[in-house]
Amino acid sequence: MKNKQYIKKPDPLGDKSFYLAMKIISIYKDLQLKKNEFNLSQQLFQSGTNPGSLIREARSAKSNSDFIYKLNMAQKSCQETIYWLELLYKSNYVKKEAYTEINNLTIEVLKMLTSSIKTKKRNIKY
Protein backbone atom coordinates (compact mmCIF):
# COMPACT_ATOMS: atom_id res chain seq x y z
CA MET A 1 0.00 0.00 0.00
CA LYS A 2 1.47 3.30 -1.10
CA ASN A 3 1.44 6.39 1.04
CA LYS A 4 -0.64 8.99 -0.70
CA GLN A 5 0.33 12.51 0.06
CA TYR A 6 -2.57 14.55 1.37
CA ILE A 7 -3.40 17.32 -1.07
CA LYS A 8 -5.52 20.07 0.39
CA LYS A 9 -8.27 21.30 -1.86
CA PRO A 10 -8.42 25.06 -2.31
CA ASP A 11 -10.66 26.51 0.39
CA PRO A 12 -10.69 30.30 0.15
CA LEU A 13 -13.61 30.69 2.59
CA GLY A 14 -12.07 28.33 5.15
CA ASP A 15 -8.65 29.95 4.82
CA LYS A 16 -10.02 33.49 5.01
CA SER A 17 -12.17 32.71 8.06
CA PHE A 18 -9.18 31.07 9.78
CA TYR A 19 -7.07 34.16 9.07
CA LEU A 20 -9.88 36.32 10.48
CA ALA A 21 -9.90 34.23 13.66
CA MET A 22 -6.13 34.66 14.01
CA LYS A 23 -6.45 38.45 13.62
CA ILE A 24 -9.28 38.48 16.20
CA ILE A 25 -7.14 36.51 18.65
CA SER A 26 -4.32 38.99 18.15
CA ILE A 27 -6.51 42.02 18.84
CA TYR A 28 -8.12 40.21 21.77
CA LYS A 29 -4.71 39.59 23.37
CA ASP A 30 -3.76 43.22 22.79
CA LEU A 31 -6.95 44.48 24.43
CA GLN A 32 -6.53 42.17 27.40
CA LEU A 33 -2.86 42.96 28.01
CA LYS A 34 -2.43 46.58 27.00
CA LYS A 35 -5.83 48.13 27.50
CA ASN A 36 -7.05 45.94 30.35
CA GLU A 37 -10.40 45.59 28.55
CA PHE A 38 -12.19 42.32 29.26
CA ASN A 39 -15.91 42.53 28.50
CA LEU A 40 -16.06 43.89 24.95
CA SER A 41 -12.95 42.01 23.90
CA GLN A 42 -14.51 38.74 25.08
CA GLN A 43 -17.57 39.43 22.93
CA LEU A 44 -15.35 40.17 19.94
CA PHE A 45 -13.31 37.02 20.58
CA GLN A 46 -16.42 34.84 20.65
CA SER A 47 -18.08 36.29 17.54
CA GLY A 48 -14.87 36.66 15.54
CA THR A 49 -13.63 33.10 15.97
CA ASN A 50 -17.05 31.52 15.51
CA PRO A 51 -17.41 31.85 11.69
CA GLY A 52 -14.39 29.66 11.03
CA SER A 53 -15.61 26.86 13.28
CA LEU A 54 -19.10 26.99 11.76
CA ILE A 55 -17.64 26.86 8.25
CA ARG A 56 -15.64 23.77 9.21
CA GLU A 57 -18.75 22.22 10.73
CA ALA A 58 -20.66 22.89 7.51
CA ARG A 59 -18.19 20.70 5.62
CA SER A 60 -19.59 17.68 7.42
CA ALA A 61 -23.23 18.77 7.37
CA LYS A 62 -25.73 15.93 7.22
CA SER A 63 -27.95 17.66 4.69
CA ASN A 64 -28.14 20.69 2.42
CA SER A 65 -30.37 22.46 4.91
CA ASP A 66 -27.87 21.74 7.71
CA PHE A 67 -25.07 23.12 5.52
CA ILE A 68 -27.04 26.29 4.80
CA TYR A 69 -28.02 26.65 8.46
CA LYS A 70 -24.39 26.51 9.60
CA LEU A 71 -23.31 29.08 7.01
CA ASN A 72 -26.23 31.31 8.04
CA MET A 73 -25.00 31.11 11.64
CA ALA A 74 -21.51 32.05 10.44
CA GLN A 75 -23.05 35.07 8.67
CA LYS A 76 -24.71 36.15 11.91
CA SER A 77 -21.40 35.83 13.74
CA CYS A 78 -19.74 38.04 11.11
CA GLN A 79 -22.46 40.68 11.57
CA GLU A 80 -21.93 40.54 15.32
CA THR A 81 -18.16 40.83 14.87
CA ILE A 82 -18.65 43.97 12.77
CA TYR A 83 -20.75 45.43 15.59
CA TRP A 84 -18.20 44.71 18.33
CA LEU A 85 -15.33 46.01 16.18
CA GLU A 86 -17.17 49.24 15.52
CA LEU A 87 -18.01 49.64 19.20
CA LEU A 88 -14.38 49.06 20.21
CA TYR A 89 -13.18 51.49 17.55
CA LYS A 90 -15.70 54.23 18.40
CA SER A 91 -14.85 53.91 22.10
CA ASN A 92 -11.13 54.31 21.32
CA TYR A 93 -10.02 50.81 22.31
CA VAL A 94 -8.97 49.89 18.76
CA LYS A 95 -6.95 52.10 16.43
CA LYS A 96 -8.27 52.99 13.01
CA GLU A 97 -5.72 50.88 11.11
CA ALA A 98 -6.52 47.70 13.05
CA TYR A 99 -10.25 48.39 12.87
CA THR A 100 -10.16 48.97 9.11
CA GLU A 101 -8.10 45.84 8.40
CA ILE A 102 -10.18 43.47 10.51
CA ASN A 103 -13.50 45.05 9.55
CA ASN A 104 -12.66 44.71 5.84
CA LEU A 105 -11.61 41.10 6.37
CA THR A 106 -14.87 40.36 8.22
CA ILE A 107 -16.89 41.94 5.42
CA GLU A 108 -14.99 39.86 2.89
CA VAL A 109 -15.79 36.64 4.78
CA LEU A 110 -19.42 37.78 5.07
CA LYS A 111 -19.64 38.31 1.31
CA MET A 112 -18.09 34.92 0.64
CA LEU A 113 -20.60 33.29 2.98
CA THR A 114 -23.49 35.04 1.27
CA SER A 115 -22.25 33.88 -2.11
CA SER A 116 -21.78 30.29 -0.88
CA ILE A 117 -25.30 30.19 0.55
CA LYS A 118 -26.83 31.55 -2.63
CA THR A 119 -24.88 29.07 -4.75
CA LYS A 120 -25.89 26.13 -2.56
CA LYS A 121 -29.56 27.16 -2.65
CA ARG A 122 -29.41 27.47 -6.44
CA ASN A 123 -27.87 24.02 -6.79
CA ILE A 124 -30.34 22.19 -4.58
CA LYS A 125 -32.54 19.93 -6.63
CA TYR A 126 -36.06 19.41 -5.36
Image (cartoon, rainbow, N blue to C red):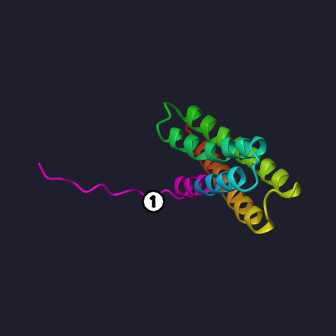
Foreground residue among 118 and 97 = 97
Q: Residue 32 at what x, y percent from top left?
A: 70, 49
Q: Residue 94 at what x, y percent from top left?
A: 78, 59
Is-magenta flag for residue 88?
A: no
- Residue 58 seen in the figure: yes
Q: Residue 109 at what x, y percent from top left?
A: 65, 55
Q: Quadrant of residue 122?
A: top right
- Residue 126 seen in the figure: no
Which residue, given by chain and number where applicable, does mark 1 sit on? 10
Secondary structure found at label 1: loop
The amino acid beneath tag 1 is Pro
Q: Residues within 10 Å of mark 1 (few under 14, many from 20)?
A: few
* Residue found at the very far right of the displayed protein: 90
* Residue found at the very far left of the displayed protein: 1
Is-magenta flag for residue 12?
A: yes
Left or right, residue 73 beside residue 60: right
Residue range corresponding to the magenta coloring: 1-21
Q: Residue 103 at what x, y percent from top left?
A: 74, 59
Is 90 drawn above or below residue 73 in the view shown?
Answer: below
Residue beneath the point at 55% across and 42% down: 53
Residue beneath the point at 58% across and 45% down: 120
